[in-house]
Amino acid sequence: MATPARHLCRSLFQVSRRIPGKRKCPSQFMAWPRQAIFLRQLSTTTPRKADEPSKSRSVRDTQEGEDYDDSLDRPTEYLTPGTLITVADLDPQERADFDLLPKQEQQEYLALQNHYAALFESEQADAALDGIVNDVDRQVDKEVEDLDFPDVALDRREAGYWAQDEDDEFGQVEDGDEPWDDSAISSIAHSELDVHREVREYTRVIAWDMPLLQQYAKPFQPPTEATPLRFRYTTYMGEAHPAAKKVVVQFCTKDLPNLTEVQRLKLIKLVGVRYNPDTDVVKMSCERFEAPAQNKRYLGDLVNKLLDEARNGADTFEDIPLDFRHHKSKKQVAFPEQWKLKPGRIQELLQARQNQGLLGPSETPALDGKEAIHSYVQTLGGRGTSPQRTL
Protein backbone atom coordinates (compact mmCIF):
# COMPACT_ATOMS: atom_id res chain seq x y z
CA MET A 1 0.00 0.00 0.00
CA ALA A 2 2.86 2.29 0.73
CA THR A 3 4.35 1.80 -2.74
CA PRO A 4 1.24 2.93 -4.76
CA ALA A 5 0.77 5.94 -2.45
CA ARG A 6 4.38 6.95 -2.82
CA HIS A 7 4.13 6.63 -6.62
CA LEU A 8 0.99 8.80 -6.68
CA CYS A 9 2.58 11.50 -4.55
CA ARG A 10 5.61 11.63 -6.84
CA SER A 11 3.43 11.94 -9.94
CA LEU A 12 1.36 14.74 -8.43
CA PHE A 13 4.51 16.55 -7.29
CA GLN A 14 6.05 16.38 -10.77
CA VAL A 15 2.88 17.59 -12.43
CA SER A 16 2.62 20.52 -10.01
CA ARG A 17 6.24 21.61 -10.78
CA ARG A 18 5.67 21.95 -14.54
CA ILE A 19 5.74 25.51 -15.84
CA PRO A 20 2.63 26.37 -17.85
CA GLY A 21 3.08 27.42 -21.49
CA LYS A 22 2.80 31.01 -22.53
CA ARG A 23 -0.75 32.00 -23.39
CA LYS A 24 -2.00 34.87 -25.44
CA CYS A 25 -3.77 37.71 -23.74
CA PRO A 26 -7.55 37.27 -24.17
CA SER A 27 -9.68 40.01 -25.62
CA GLN A 28 -11.40 42.57 -23.46
CA PHE A 29 -14.86 40.97 -23.49
CA MET A 30 -13.44 37.53 -22.57
CA ALA A 31 -11.13 38.72 -19.75
CA TRP A 32 -11.94 37.69 -16.20
CA PRO A 33 -12.45 40.32 -13.55
CA ARG A 34 -9.20 41.28 -11.87
CA GLN A 35 -10.65 41.00 -8.39
CA ALA A 36 -10.92 37.21 -8.65
CA ILE A 37 -7.57 35.40 -8.48
CA PHE A 38 -7.56 31.71 -9.33
CA LEU A 39 -4.71 29.58 -8.00
CA ARG A 40 -3.54 26.22 -9.24
CA GLN A 41 -3.78 23.42 -6.71
CA LEU A 42 -0.70 21.46 -5.67
CA SER A 43 1.63 24.20 -7.05
CA THR A 44 4.93 25.25 -5.56
CA THR A 45 5.17 28.48 -7.61
CA THR A 46 4.16 31.84 -6.22
CA PRO A 47 0.73 33.13 -7.20
CA ARG A 48 0.77 35.60 -10.11
CA LYS A 49 -1.63 37.17 -12.51
CA ALA A 50 -1.90 35.62 -15.94
CA ASP A 51 0.03 37.64 -18.52
CA GLU A 52 0.43 40.61 -16.18
CA PRO A 53 2.01 43.57 -18.05
CA SER A 54 5.20 45.03 -16.65
CA LYS A 55 5.42 48.48 -15.16
CA SER A 56 7.74 49.84 -17.86
CA ARG A 57 5.35 49.67 -20.82
CA SER A 58 5.63 51.38 -24.16
CA VAL A 59 2.90 53.35 -25.87
CA ARG A 60 1.89 50.33 -27.96
CA ASP A 61 1.51 48.13 -24.82
CA THR A 62 -0.68 50.81 -23.30
CA GLN A 63 -2.99 50.77 -26.36
CA GLU A 64 -3.12 46.99 -26.93
CA GLY A 65 -2.93 45.76 -23.31
CA GLU A 66 -5.56 45.57 -20.66
CA ASP A 67 -6.78 48.32 -18.37
CA TYR A 68 -3.76 48.91 -16.18
CA ASP A 69 -3.49 51.68 -13.70
CA ASP A 70 0.09 52.96 -13.81
CA SER A 71 -0.56 56.08 -11.76
CA LEU A 72 1.60 54.61 -9.00
CA ASP A 73 4.65 54.62 -11.31
CA ARG A 74 4.27 58.24 -12.35
CA PRO A 75 6.23 60.89 -10.40
CA THR A 76 4.46 63.54 -8.38
CA GLU A 77 6.68 66.27 -9.84
CA TYR A 78 8.12 66.22 -13.35
CA LEU A 79 11.70 67.35 -13.91
CA THR A 80 12.90 69.37 -16.89
CA PRO A 81 16.08 68.30 -18.75
CA GLY A 82 18.59 70.63 -20.39
CA THR A 83 17.32 69.69 -23.88
CA LEU A 84 13.56 69.15 -24.14
CA ILE A 85 12.23 66.15 -26.05
CA THR A 86 9.61 67.14 -28.63
CA VAL A 87 7.43 65.24 -31.06
CA ALA A 88 10.05 65.73 -33.79
CA ASP A 89 12.56 63.67 -31.77
CA LEU A 90 10.41 60.50 -31.91
CA ASP A 91 11.14 57.80 -34.47
CA PRO A 92 8.44 56.82 -37.02
CA GLN A 93 7.14 53.89 -34.94
CA GLU A 94 6.94 55.93 -31.74
CA ARG A 95 5.31 58.79 -33.65
CA ALA A 96 2.62 56.44 -34.97
CA ASP A 97 1.87 55.21 -31.43
CA PHE A 98 1.97 58.78 -30.13
CA ASP A 99 -0.69 59.91 -32.61
CA LEU A 100 -3.08 57.21 -31.36
CA LEU A 101 -3.11 58.66 -27.82
CA PRO A 102 -5.59 61.30 -26.65
CA LYS A 103 -4.47 64.89 -26.25
CA GLN A 104 -4.06 64.71 -22.49
CA GLU A 105 -2.10 61.47 -22.58
CA GLN A 106 0.17 62.86 -25.29
CA GLN A 107 1.20 65.74 -23.01
CA GLU A 108 1.72 63.36 -20.09
CA TYR A 109 3.83 61.06 -22.31
CA LEU A 110 6.15 63.90 -23.37
CA ALA A 111 6.40 65.15 -19.79
CA LEU A 112 7.30 61.65 -18.59
CA GLN A 113 9.99 61.27 -21.29
CA ASN A 114 11.52 64.62 -20.35
CA HIS A 115 11.41 63.59 -16.68
CA TYR A 116 13.37 60.41 -17.45
CA ALA A 117 15.90 62.40 -19.49
CA ALA A 118 16.38 64.79 -16.58
CA LEU A 119 16.95 61.87 -14.22
CA PHE A 120 19.68 60.50 -16.49
CA GLU A 121 21.33 63.91 -16.56
CA SER A 122 21.34 64.28 -12.80
CA GLU A 123 24.15 63.25 -10.48
CA GLN A 124 21.95 60.68 -8.76
CA ALA A 125 21.62 58.74 -11.99
CA ASP A 126 25.41 58.74 -12.45
CA ALA A 127 25.89 57.54 -8.87
CA ALA A 128 23.29 54.80 -9.31
CA LEU A 129 24.96 53.72 -12.57
CA ASP A 130 28.34 53.57 -10.84
CA GLY A 131 26.81 51.45 -8.09
CA ILE A 132 25.40 49.00 -10.63
CA VAL A 133 28.77 48.74 -12.37
CA ASN A 134 30.54 48.11 -9.07
CA ASP A 135 28.03 45.39 -8.16
CA VAL A 136 28.59 43.66 -11.50
CA ASP A 137 32.36 43.83 -11.03
CA ARG A 138 32.14 42.30 -7.58
CA GLN A 139 29.85 39.55 -8.84
CA VAL A 140 32.28 38.73 -11.69
CA ASP A 141 35.21 38.65 -9.28
CA LYS A 142 33.35 36.15 -7.12
CA GLU A 143 32.46 33.84 -9.99
CA VAL A 144 35.78 33.91 -11.87
CA GLU A 145 38.69 32.13 -10.26
CA ASP A 146 42.17 33.62 -10.41
CA LEU A 147 44.74 31.88 -12.58
CA ASP A 148 47.38 30.25 -10.45
CA PHE A 149 50.77 29.34 -11.89
CA PRO A 150 52.60 27.37 -9.24
CA ASP A 151 56.25 28.25 -8.98
CA VAL A 152 57.95 24.89 -8.47
CA ALA A 153 61.63 25.20 -7.71
CA LEU A 154 63.84 22.90 -9.77
CA ASP A 155 67.14 21.58 -8.57
CA ARG A 156 70.05 23.18 -10.43
CA ARG A 157 71.73 19.85 -10.84
CA GLU A 158 68.70 18.48 -12.65
CA ALA A 159 68.20 21.59 -14.83
CA GLY A 160 71.80 21.81 -16.05
CA TYR A 161 73.72 24.90 -17.17
CA TRP A 162 71.43 25.76 -20.13
CA ALA A 163 68.28 24.42 -18.38
CA GLN A 164 67.76 21.92 -21.20
CA ASP A 165 66.27 19.31 -18.87
CA GLU A 166 63.62 21.72 -17.58
CA ASP A 167 60.06 21.02 -18.75
CA ASP A 168 58.49 23.95 -20.63
CA GLU A 169 54.78 23.86 -19.84
CA PHE A 170 54.01 26.47 -22.53
CA GLY A 171 56.10 24.83 -25.25
CA GLN A 172 54.77 21.30 -25.08
CA VAL A 173 52.97 21.17 -28.41
CA GLU A 174 52.78 18.54 -31.10
CA ASP A 175 54.16 20.73 -33.92
CA GLY A 176 57.30 21.88 -32.13
CA ASP A 177 60.50 23.01 -33.81
CA GLU A 178 62.33 20.28 -35.67
CA PRO A 179 65.87 19.45 -34.61
CA TRP A 180 68.58 21.40 -36.40
CA ASP A 181 70.37 19.56 -39.20
CA ASP A 182 74.07 20.41 -39.25
CA SER A 183 74.40 19.36 -42.89
CA ALA A 184 71.83 21.95 -44.10
CA ILE A 185 72.94 25.18 -45.81
CA SER A 186 71.74 28.69 -45.07
CA SER A 187 69.24 30.76 -47.04
CA ILE A 188 72.06 32.90 -48.51
CA ALA A 189 73.68 29.76 -49.92
CA HIS A 190 70.36 28.72 -51.46
CA SER A 191 70.14 32.15 -53.15
CA GLU A 192 73.62 31.72 -54.60
CA LEU A 193 72.64 28.31 -55.95
CA ASP A 194 69.56 29.81 -57.63
CA VAL A 195 71.71 32.42 -59.36
CA HIS A 196 74.14 29.73 -60.49
CA ARG A 197 71.31 27.63 -61.94
CA GLU A 198 69.91 30.65 -63.81
CA VAL A 199 73.31 31.46 -65.34
CA ARG A 200 73.75 27.86 -66.49
CA GLU A 201 70.27 27.86 -68.03
CA TYR A 202 70.96 30.98 -70.12
CA THR A 203 74.36 29.61 -71.08
CA ARG A 204 72.69 26.50 -72.52
CA VAL A 205 70.25 28.73 -74.43
CA ILE A 206 73.14 30.71 -75.92
CA ALA A 207 74.99 27.55 -76.90
CA TRP A 208 72.12 25.52 -78.37
CA ASP A 209 69.08 27.70 -79.09
CA MET A 210 70.56 30.97 -80.35
CA PRO A 211 72.29 29.47 -83.44
CA LEU A 212 68.92 28.14 -84.58
CA LEU A 213 67.63 31.71 -84.92
CA GLN A 214 70.01 32.36 -87.81
CA GLN A 215 67.54 30.91 -90.29
CA TYR A 216 65.03 33.64 -89.39
CA ALA A 217 67.47 36.52 -89.92
CA LYS A 218 66.47 39.16 -92.50
CA PRO A 219 68.53 41.96 -94.04
CA PHE A 220 67.91 45.39 -92.61
CA GLN A 221 65.88 47.72 -94.78
CA PRO A 222 65.70 51.37 -93.73
CA PRO A 223 62.23 52.89 -93.51
CA THR A 224 60.90 54.57 -96.59
CA GLU A 225 58.93 57.78 -96.98
CA ALA A 226 55.72 55.77 -96.82
CA THR A 227 56.42 54.90 -93.14
CA PRO A 228 57.27 58.17 -91.34
CA LEU A 229 56.13 56.89 -87.92
CA ARG A 230 58.70 55.27 -85.63
CA PHE A 231 57.32 53.21 -82.72
CA ARG A 232 59.40 52.19 -79.72
CA TYR A 233 58.60 49.40 -77.26
CA THR A 234 60.06 48.35 -73.91
CA THR A 235 60.62 44.72 -72.96
CA TYR A 236 62.01 43.08 -69.83
CA MET A 237 62.86 39.65 -71.29
CA GLY A 238 59.73 37.80 -70.24
CA GLU A 239 59.33 39.48 -66.82
CA ALA A 240 56.11 41.20 -65.89
CA HIS A 241 56.67 44.95 -65.45
CA PRO A 242 54.25 47.92 -65.39
CA ALA A 243 56.34 49.82 -67.97
CA ALA A 244 56.21 46.99 -70.54
CA LYS A 245 52.87 48.25 -71.91
CA LYS A 246 54.21 51.73 -72.77
CA VAL A 247 54.57 52.63 -76.48
CA VAL A 248 56.31 55.77 -77.83
CA VAL A 249 55.83 57.20 -81.33
CA GLN A 250 58.10 59.75 -83.04
CA PHE A 251 57.76 61.44 -86.41
CA CYS A 252 59.17 64.42 -88.24
CA THR A 253 56.68 67.01 -89.41
CA LYS A 254 58.50 67.50 -92.73
CA ASP A 255 58.28 63.77 -93.51
CA LEU A 256 54.48 63.66 -93.31
CA PRO A 257 52.90 63.46 -96.77
CA ASN A 258 50.47 65.97 -98.29
CA LEU A 259 51.15 68.80 -95.83
CA THR A 260 51.69 72.39 -96.90
CA GLU A 261 53.78 74.77 -94.85
CA VAL A 262 50.68 76.38 -93.34
CA GLN A 263 49.28 72.98 -92.39
CA ARG A 264 52.62 71.91 -90.93
CA LEU A 265 52.75 75.00 -88.72
CA LYS A 266 49.18 74.30 -87.59
CA LEU A 267 50.19 70.73 -86.68
CA ILE A 268 53.09 72.08 -84.63
CA LYS A 269 50.70 74.36 -82.75
CA LEU A 270 48.32 71.45 -82.13
CA VAL A 271 50.92 69.12 -80.63
CA GLY A 272 52.19 71.87 -78.30
CA VAL A 273 54.98 70.87 -75.92
CA ARG A 274 55.52 67.51 -77.64
CA TYR A 275 57.39 69.24 -80.48
CA ASN A 276 61.18 69.65 -80.47
CA PRO A 277 62.14 72.69 -82.60
CA ASP A 278 65.83 71.69 -82.81
CA THR A 279 65.20 68.30 -84.41
CA ASP A 280 61.69 68.95 -85.86
CA VAL A 281 60.48 65.72 -84.15
CA VAL A 282 57.14 65.16 -82.42
CA LYS A 283 57.23 62.62 -79.56
CA MET A 284 54.13 61.10 -77.92
CA SER A 285 53.60 58.10 -75.65
CA CYS A 286 50.67 56.06 -74.34
CA GLU A 287 50.32 53.55 -71.47
CA ARG A 288 46.58 53.79 -70.92
CA PHE A 289 45.75 50.22 -71.96
CA GLU A 290 47.10 46.88 -70.74
CA ALA A 291 48.43 45.56 -74.06
CA PRO A 292 51.14 47.34 -76.12
CA ALA A 293 49.15 46.69 -79.31
CA GLN A 294 46.22 48.66 -77.92
CA ASN A 295 48.46 51.60 -77.03
CA LYS A 296 50.02 51.53 -80.52
CA ARG A 297 46.57 51.54 -82.13
CA TYR A 298 45.55 54.49 -79.96
CA LEU A 299 48.66 56.48 -81.00
CA GLY A 300 48.04 55.71 -84.68
CA ASP A 301 44.45 56.94 -84.43
CA LEU A 302 45.64 60.05 -82.59
CA VAL A 303 48.14 60.90 -85.36
CA ASN A 304 45.40 60.49 -87.99
CA LYS A 305 43.13 62.87 -86.05
CA LEU A 306 45.93 65.44 -85.83
CA LEU A 307 46.54 65.23 -89.58
CA ASP A 308 42.83 65.58 -90.36
CA GLU A 309 42.61 68.64 -88.11
CA ALA A 310 45.77 70.15 -89.63
CA ARG A 311 44.41 69.71 -93.16
CA ASN A 312 41.10 71.33 -92.16
CA GLY A 313 41.10 74.78 -93.75
CA ALA A 314 38.32 76.23 -91.61
CA ASP A 315 40.89 77.70 -89.17
CA THR A 316 44.61 77.76 -89.95
CA PHE A 317 45.69 79.27 -86.59
CA GLU A 318 47.71 81.91 -88.39
CA ASP A 319 46.86 84.48 -85.71
CA ILE A 320 48.46 82.26 -83.01
CA PRO A 321 52.26 82.56 -82.78
CA LEU A 322 54.58 79.62 -82.29
CA ASP A 323 55.50 79.10 -78.64
CA PHE A 324 58.71 77.18 -77.94
CA ARG A 325 59.20 78.21 -74.32
CA HIS A 326 58.87 74.61 -73.23
CA HIS A 327 62.10 73.67 -75.03
CA LYS A 328 65.56 74.64 -73.86
CA SER A 329 68.09 74.28 -76.66
CA LYS A 330 71.43 72.74 -75.84
CA LYS A 331 74.41 74.91 -76.65
CA GLN A 332 76.38 73.45 -79.54
CA VAL A 333 80.07 74.34 -79.19
CA ALA A 334 81.79 74.58 -82.59
CA PHE A 335 85.50 74.85 -83.28
CA PRO A 336 86.30 78.44 -84.33
CA GLU A 337 87.21 78.86 -87.98
CA GLN A 338 90.08 81.24 -87.18
CA TRP A 339 91.71 78.55 -85.09
CA LYS A 340 91.85 76.06 -87.92
CA LEU A 341 95.17 75.65 -89.77
CA LYS A 342 95.35 77.03 -93.27
CA PRO A 343 97.18 75.09 -95.99
CA GLY A 344 99.97 77.71 -96.10
CA ARG A 345 100.50 77.45 -92.34
CA ILE A 346 100.66 73.67 -92.63
CA GLN A 347 103.41 73.92 -95.24
CA GLU A 348 105.35 76.28 -92.97
CA LEU A 349 105.12 73.86 -90.03
CA LEU A 350 106.22 70.95 -92.18
CA GLN A 351 109.14 72.95 -93.52
CA ALA A 352 110.16 73.89 -89.97
CA ARG A 353 110.06 70.27 -88.87
CA GLN A 354 112.20 69.31 -91.86
CA ASN A 355 114.77 71.98 -91.09
CA GLN A 356 115.06 70.65 -87.53
CA GLY A 357 115.79 67.16 -88.85
CA LEU A 358 112.57 65.62 -87.66
CA LEU A 359 111.44 64.78 -91.20
CA GLY A 360 113.43 63.61 -94.20
CA PRO A 361 113.21 65.21 -97.64
CA SER A 362 111.17 62.32 -98.98
CA GLU A 363 108.74 62.35 -96.02
CA THR A 364 107.48 65.88 -96.60
CA PRO A 365 103.89 65.50 -97.89
CA ALA A 366 102.76 67.86 -100.58
CA LEU A 367 99.12 67.85 -99.62
CA ASP A 368 96.56 70.47 -98.80
CA GLY A 369 93.98 70.87 -96.04
CA LYS A 370 92.79 67.97 -93.98
CA GLU A 371 94.71 65.36 -95.96
CA ALA A 372 97.99 67.14 -95.20
CA ILE A 373 97.22 67.31 -91.48
CA HIS A 374 96.18 63.63 -91.36
CA SER A 375 99.29 62.54 -93.20
CA TYR A 376 101.46 64.71 -90.99
CA VAL A 377 99.98 63.21 -87.80
CA GLN A 378 100.45 59.68 -89.11
CA THR A 379 104.06 60.43 -89.96
CA LEU A 380 104.80 61.73 -86.50
CA GLY A 381 103.05 58.79 -84.86
CA GLY A 382 105.01 56.26 -86.91
CA ARG A 383 108.39 57.77 -86.07
CA GLY A 384 107.53 57.87 -82.33
CA THR A 385 109.14 61.29 -81.87
CA SER A 386 107.80 64.31 -80.10
CA PRO A 387 108.19 67.43 -82.28
CA GLN A 388 109.38 70.66 -80.70
CA ARG A 389 107.03 73.64 -80.64
CA THR A 390 108.44 76.40 -82.88
CA LEU A 391 106.13 79.06 -84.13
Image (cartoon, rainbow, N blue to C red):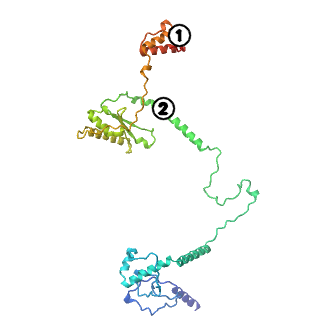
Decide if residue 283 is in sight here: no
Amino acid marked by disc 2: Ile
Q: Which residue is mark 1?
A: 358
Q: Residue 335, image x and y in percent? A: 43, 23
Tell which of 314 and 149 is nearer to you: 314
Furthest residue in direction top, as rendered: 361
At x 40% / y 29%, what residue is drawn?
A: 215
Up-down relation of residue 111 to residue 327 (above or below): below
Decide if residue 150 is in sight here: yes
Tell which of 175 and 355 is nearer to you: 355
Q: Residue 290, image x and y in percent? A: 39, 45
Tell which of 105 and 301 is nearer to you: 105
Q: Is residue 154 left or right of residue 217?
A: right
Quadrant of the rendered image containing residue 189 = top right
Q: Which residue is mark 2?
A: 206
Secondary structure, mark 1, is loop
Furthest residue in direction left, as rendered: 314
What whole-number distance in Å separates the C-alpha atoms at marks 2 and 1? Answer: 54 Å
Quadrant housing the N terminus: bottom right
Q: Residue 184, image x and y in percent? A: 62, 44
Amino acid marked by disc 1: Leu
Q: Residues within 10 Å of mark 2 (few under 14, many from 20)?
A: few
Circle count: 2
Quadrant of the rendered image containing residue 247 = top left
**In the image, which is nearer the foreground, mark 2 or mark 1?**
1
Secondary structure, mark 2, is helix
